[in-house]
Image (cartoon, rainbow, N blue to C red):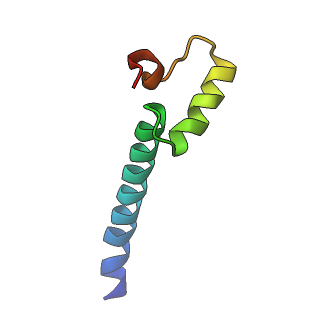
C-alpha cells in the first residue's frame, strides 16, 4: 500500500516546490520581495544590464 503512494507523493511534492519557487522568483523580480530579490541582486552584480521590471515600468 505504501509503495503505491510514494511515487505520486514525491511527484506532487516536487510540483508544489517548483510552483512555490517560480512564484517567489516572479514576485521578487517585479519588486514584491521574495527569492527574486536575491536573484535580482545577484544578477545586478554579475550582469550590469539586468534591470527588474519594477525599474522598467516604475511601479
Furthest-bottom residue in view?
A: 1
11 or 49, which lies in front? 49
Q: Position of residue 42 (x, y in %)?
A: 65, 30
Identify the image quadrant of the N terminus: bottom left
46 or 15, which lies in front? 46
Looking at the image, which residue is at 41% across and 44% down?
22
Tell me where residue 9 sits by quadrant.
bottom left
Q: How many marks?
A: 0
Looking at the image, which residue is at 33% across and 64% down?
12
Q: Position of residue 2 (x, y in %)?
A: 36, 86
Q: Position of residue 29 (x, y in %)?
A: 47, 32
39 or 30, which lies in front? 30
Q: Above or below — where is 13 with respect to 43?
A: below
Q: Position of residue 54 (x, y in %)?
A: 44, 25
Q: Above or below — where is 17 with respect to 1?
A: above
Q: Above or below — where is 31 with respect to 50?
A: below
Q: Above or below — where is 55 with respect to 22?
A: above
Looking at the image, which residue is at 39% across and 26% down?
59
Tell me where residue 41 sits by quadrant.
top right
Compared across the picture, whether 51 is left or right of 38 comes to left
Furthest-top residue in view?
A: 49
Compared across the picture, whether 43 is left or right of 45 comes to left
Furthest-right residue in view?
A: 45
30 or 46, which lies in front? 30
Amino acid at each position: 500500500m505504501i509503495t503505491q503512494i510514494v511515487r505520486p507523493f514525491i511527484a506532487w511534492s516536487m510540483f508544489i516546490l517548483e510552483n512555490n519557487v517560480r512564484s517567489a522568483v516572479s514576485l521578487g523580480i517585479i519588486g514584491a520581495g521574495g527569492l527574486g530579490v536575491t536573484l535580482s541582486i545577484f544578477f545586478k552584480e554579475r550582469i550590469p544590464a539586468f534591470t527588474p521590471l519594477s525599474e522598467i515600468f516604475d511601479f
